[in-house]
Amino acid sequence: MIAYSSSRSLFFGVDCALKYANPFLKSNPLTYFERISGVAKEDARMDRNKKLKSAGGIRQCQWRPVSVSNIQESTAEDSVNELEDGDHAQEPIKVAQVVTDNCDSTISAGVLDDTVKPVLSAEKHSLLLEVGASLIRFIKGKEGSTQKKIEEEMGVKIVFPSSKKGESIVIEGISTDCVTRASKKIQAIMNEAIESSLDYSHFISLPLAIYPELTDKLVNFQNSILGTNDVSADENLESDSIEDTLDIENKGQELIKGRDVAVELKVEDEKHVKVDLTSIPFVSYPPKPPRLPNASDFGIDKSIFIKPTTFHLTVLMLKLWNKERVNAASGVLKSISSKVIDALDNRPISIRLKGLDTMRGSLSKARVLYAPVEEIGSEGRLLSACQVIINAFVEAGLVLEKDAKQKLKLHATVMNARHRKGKRRRKNDSFDARGIFKQFGSEDWGEYLIREAHLSQRFVFDENGYYYCCASIPFPGKEERQQTD
C-alpha cells in the first residue's frame, strides 16, 4: 500500500497553480518540496530552468503520490533496571550484559531524491554498568560536558536511567574496543570522585538522641543562643524604631505647637528687611542608642546546630555509593556483634559528656563545636569495641585508605559550620564561639548508657526525626535498660 502525503501534495498543486495563473511572475521561486529538501536555492533554480528550456518553455505539472518515510532513531532503552550489584572503587567494572544488534535503516528528513539508498549501520555493542546513583552526576559533568567529551573521544553513546534512583548506565558503540575504553574512562572518573568530591553517605554511630533529658538540654542550649538573643535583639530593634518614630513625631509637634518666638524686623528701605535671629531656640535630638549584638553578628544561625533528634557519637564515616556496598556494610556490622560484646567484657558501658571544645579552628573562628566524651571507669573498653568495628570495615574494603589511617576520637558534635544554609555559606566557613564557650564551656551534659551501635544514612530520617538506621547491634545492658524504661 502506498502512503500519500495529502498536505504536501496540496501545497505542491497550489504552487503550480499560482505560478501559471499569475502572468506577472517572472522569477522561478522554489516549490514547497524544494524549500524543505535542503537543496541550495541557486542550484534548484538552474535545474528547473534547464527543464523548462528542454520542454520548449512549457512547464508541465503532474500530480503524483509522495511517500515520506517515518524517521526513526535507534536508541537504547530510556530506563535501566536498578541492580543489587556494585563495584568497589579500586576494582574493575563488572560487565553485566553485552548485547549485539543491528540498527534500523533510516532516511534523512526532507530528502526527496529517489536515488538515496538506506545505509545500514555497523553492529552495535552495549555494555550495562552499575555505577551508583550518587556517582552519575560526575559521569555527566557540568551541563553534560564530561559525558559529551567521552562520547566524542570514544565514539560511543552513554544512556542514563530515567529515574533519579537508577544506579546503572548503558554504553553503546560500534565495537567492543570503543565500549571497553569508554568504560575504563568512566571507572577512572568514578575513582577520582570517590576519593575527593563524593560526600560521605553513611556512618557508624553510638546514638544518644534516645534520651529525652539530653535532647531537652540541647534544645535549651540552642534557644539560649538563638531564641533569647534573637527575640531580644528583634524587640530592641523594633522598640528602637518605634521610639525613633515617636521622637520625630513629638519633635515635629513641638516645632508646630512650640512656644511663640518674637522676631524683630527692621525695615532699612523698600527692598531690604533686617531680621534678628538671636531669640529663635535651637532644637537638638538625642543620639540613637547602639544596637545590641545578636547571634548573626557572630556567624551563628539555626542551621549550624545539630538537630537534637540526631545527636550521637561518631565512630566511622563511610562512602557507600550503591546498594551492594550498603548491603555489605550491614552484613559486616551484624557479623561482629559477638566480637564487640567480648571487647566490652560483656558488661554495660556508660559515658559522661562535659564541657565544650573546638575541632579544626580556634574559638574565634570555630568550624566544629563538640562535647568531649569520658568513659566512666576509664577502662578503655569503649574504645576497644569501636576499634573492633573499624577494623572489620577496613578488612571488608568499605573504608577509604585515608580514613583508615585516621585516629579515633569519640566526640558529640553540637554545632557544625558545614551545615550552614543560605548565602552566607563559604568554603572555610566558621563562627565565633567565644561567647558560647564562656557560657557553656564547663556544661555538664550528663551520664548515659551506650545501648547499641548503628549503621545510619546521612540526610535521611525516619518518622521520628532520627537518622535512618540500615543496621544495628546491641551493647550489653540494653535489655536491662529497656525493662527499666
Image (cartoon, rainbow, N blue to C red):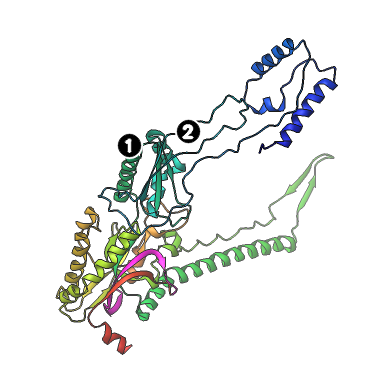
Q: Residues within 10 Å of mark 1 (few under 14, many from 20)?
A: few
- Which quarter of the figure is the N terminus placed in? top right
Q: Disc 2 or 1, which lies upstream in sequence?
A: 2
Q: Secondary structure at mark 1?
A: helix
Q: Is residue 143 visible?
A: yes
Q: Is residue 419 above or below residue 337?
A: above
Residue at left 80%, top 42%?
268
The answer for how far apart the CA atoms under marks 2 and 1 are is: 20 Å
Residue that numbered label 1 is attached to = 177
Which three-letter amino acid code belongs to the residue tagged 2? Leu
- Which quarter of the figure is the C terminus placed in? bottom left
Residue that numbered label 2 is attached to = 120
User: Over which residues does the magenta segment extend?
Assistant: 441-463
Q: Is residue 206 above or below residue 16?
A: below
- Comparing 53 with 422, the one in front is 53
Image-based side of 451 in relation to 425, left or right: left
